[in-house]
Image: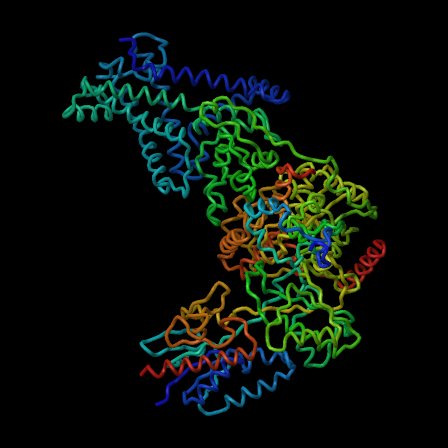
Amino acid sequence: MEKFGFTISKIRQIDYDSNDRSIADYIYEREPSFRLCIECGGCSATCTTGNYTNFSLRELHILIKRGENSQVIENLKKCMLCGKCILVCPRGVNTRNIVILARQAFQKSDSYAI
Amino acid sequence: MSKHVVVIGAGVAGLEAAGRLSKAGFYVSLLEKEVKTGGHLNDWYKLFPDRRNSSEVKHYLDKLTLNDGIKILSGTTIEKFSKRKSHFSIITDKGNEIIADAVVVATGFDLFKSARKEEYGYGIYDNVITSAELEGMFRNDKIALCNGKIPGAIGIVHCVGSRDEKVGNLYCSKLCCVTAVKQAIEICEHLPESKVFCFYMDMRMGGAHYEELYREAQEKWGVNFIRGKVSEAGETINNRLVIKVEDTLAGRPLKMELDMLVLMAGMEMSDGGKKIAGISGLNTGENRFFSAADPHYGSNISNIKGVFYAGTCTAPMNITETISHARAAVSEVMDYLKDVN
Amino acid sequence: MQFDPFVIPFNIGLYFILFYVVFRCVIWFRGLSRPDKLRLQRGFFGNAFVLSLKEIFLESLLHKKILKTNIRLGYMHMSLAFGWFLLIFFGTIEADIFGTKHLNAPYKAIFFRYFNPEHGRMGFEAAYGFLMDLILAFILSGLILAISKRFYSRVVGMKKTTKLKLSDKIALTSLWLIFPSRLLAESFTSGTYGNGSFLTGTLGSWLASFLPAQQMAYPFWLLYSLSLGTFFVLLPVTRYMHIPAELFLIFMRNCGIKTGDKSGTYTEVQTYSCSSCGICIDACQLNFSAGITNIQPAYLMKAIRNNDDVSEIANNCLLCGRCDQKCPVGIELSPIRMIQRRVGDNENVFTNIYKGYFRKRLHNIPEKSNGQLSYNFLPVTDPEKVDVLYFAGCMTHLTPSIKNSMVKILDASGVKYKFIDEQGGVCCGRPLMLAGMDKEARELINYNSQLFWKSGAHTLVTSCPICYKVFKESYYLGVEVLHHSQFIKSQIEEGSLKMNFLRKKVVYHTPCDLGRGSGVYDEPRFVLKHVSRLEKSKFDDENSLCCGGSLANLKLSSGKKYKIAQDTAAELTKGNPEILATACPLCKKTLSSATETRVADISEIVAEALIVTSVKRNINKQVSSIRELANI
């Protein structure tokens, strides 16, 4: 069966079942507005850091939610916490707190090196 | 003696309700704060999705309301509203008292005041305009920048004042997506050389033939759709606009220079409606629109017996829905007045 | 009679607390840095000591500042503190004059009537007895207020009263018992011997008329001694530690010691000096607008004293500074909160009460780091040489009207300037500092400083009070830093800006970081008066409200921010102004979402009033295009 031609390539696939979503859970618990994101990209558009790097808060959100954490850690510390994203967000997501909580969660977790 | 019904607001809903009530044999007073009847219909050039001239609908409504049973009081606002037993007493700004057996509230909507989203630069940059102003340009058959030049690149921003907690509007205005598509096509018709870009969060093309219109915009007119909320607009030294948006599907920020930016202003409870709510005690919801007794089978019924709602004073609606809603209100009025002496 | 076993609890308590306070002061002293130790030594033999005595009398005893804010609350504190002081003072003298010998042990003064029951029948003795009764009555009146405050805080004019832990409750009960038991003990004794003054005498004879006064006296003397003893023994682990700590704090402050940015003796003394009076709770908008009632300074101080994990409390604060302004003890509340933010998460190392007597530093969780800089992606740039730099700030880019107005004003003023973050800049670093991330903030500060230096400018103008504060305090630029309101004022005074008078009725909202944060109150008012009819509001200057949008609060939900904004806007627009003016892009954005009144920045109003002659405008157009060319 596994030789059957329709399996998705492992590298591309988000392995939702086995991915570690504890970072997301850590944030959900402490900042409920994390759930409100509709991926509009307003935050990334206005982002001060996004002017200089490939940092995208929207992408960071969705990757954490899917448990694709390894892609997040390096980018996380690029955020300057300037707060423009909070003023733009149409859903009232407390974006800065999510960045801070994500940093905290990675700091506390033994599974990730920083 | 025939019963007297007051209809507040002579937009699409008010005109339809007044016409139908008159046909049913009621004596109708139609109050309108503006000099002209027709409401927002007057500001729109062509309608979605079939791009009929709005004057055709206006013509239908005018014909419907052109009879002796309807007294149109234009340029009139209401100062006091009270209920005495089964009668309503309405005092106008001119000091006249109108006694009615039933009231239909059809105060409609106001377009979101785009200057409230300062980051889009409406009122600050010359070539940032609203969807209503663009309709005016269509009507005059001249789409041009302030300096009279033809815009080469035009951006259309969806959801201005809708789905945005920053301005206190959590709801979707429902019609801006299809309006954007319609206007994009019309721009392309007028200015075949120009490029049009729609910036959307979600394309909500739920009405009959909307999706087909969307398809036409892509297929026939080459309108570009970019998924991302515009965060801010700025101006370059040579008076072009520059917008910041994330192309969320590409996952990268996108910076683009445009000549003109059209803001798809959403629908809000009208100021007139807010005033009526204030003086009458009619309930409004968290979205500030009038809240009807039941969302499924009582969408015309208010918290005051004998007062009924018609049209967009309860929620964003297109013209088809508004007309149906007004007719439903008429049927509620008839039911109600049957039992009242 | 010279001694009775009932005084033992009192003696234990008294000698314990005296020993403990000395012990604690030695530890505190040893924890000071060398310069601070020298300051303290110098202060001890200098003016600071005298000043401190005066302040201790005015604040620790009379509670002048609390009296000013809230007269009933002040009376409560004064009657207990000053009354008790008088009772001890005159009691000691009484024991000394009328006792069997001079220089008595303290218990002789405290339980004077027990050991001298026949005393006070006539003449001077009776007059003195009257005085002692008067003082006792004074204390009891305050006690009644205190007890009713516990059960019904409105009595003293407060909206909220602080919540207590168990040791506090026991200490509070013993404190409450001290004076009633003294009253009853003295009354029964007076009743037995038929003496006593207007209070103890009257009550005593009345009680003796239906109770066996002689038998009843002893238990109350014992209760009096016990409640004193309990109170003293528990004092170090309760909020009442503020009584000795405040004395030390006042002295340290007068010696010139400051909070700084790390935890140390001075912060510890300050946290212990908080009496939980609750004035900060009343001043806090998170309390009265957003209904959050567990994060105010009184709770933060308590949590720090208890070694709780305070990160949640510390981060849920607008840092508007209203509490700093109002704290009667003068505790630097916001700097202490900032220290806690820098500390971050910590582990609670104490679990039971008795360890509270020996305070240790908390264990910090070590931070994981790969040692790399966070913002090494920032490009190195070479700005052109100019006189004046204009830095709009991140927030101003979301209020283009402010940005445009400033360009108009700068053009009209004729100064040679550069709009340095016209295409977007790098954050000033303050938002990171507010999150306790000073190391990261320092990277941004260094980056921006380089940029400013290279331009050779002598003046840096910014539109954002958040940037202004950090430029002033944490950048070492060596250039003049101005908020745009200050720049506009200077240009008006120099005559470079000409304006019409707009005749509009305006109310001014002072941004927290500009007003209380940086002390800039007069310049915005000067500018507004120059162009409009500036009206007063109840919340001007030091008493200004926060808009609610503060970046300092990392936890507040957008809904609660909105509530604060609504309340603030409603207060400020009570007089129906045409414009609600402010001097901060963030305040403007936050307030304009919450009111129908037009909200405008000072720069917009000035730009509206500006008279630009056509000749000048042409010149400026050229200047700006040259500027643009140079940019390219």
**Residue reaching furthest top?**
C101
| Observer-nearest of C152 and C388 | C152
Q: Quadrant of the N terminus of chain B?
A: bottom left
Residue at horizontal 60%, vertical 87%?
Answer: B56
Instruction: Name the spot of residue C206 as percent of width and height, x first.
Output: 17, 26
Instruction: Residue C51: tell me if it is visible.
Output: no
Residue at horizontal 64%, vertical 38%?
Answer: A107
| Observer-nearest of B214 and C625 | B214
Instruction: Name the spot of residue B169 as percent of width and height, x first.
Output: 55, 63
Q: Is residue C228 above or below residue C575?
A: above
Q: Is residue C80 left or right of residue B288?
A: left
Instruction: Name the spot of residue C565 as percent of width and height, x first.
Output: 53, 53
Q: Is residue C554 above or below residue C48?
A: below
**Residue reaching furthest bottom?**
B68
Q: Is residue C99 above or below residue B47?
A: above
Quarter of the image for residue A26 reads top right
Q: Quadrant of the C terminus of chain B?
A: bottom left
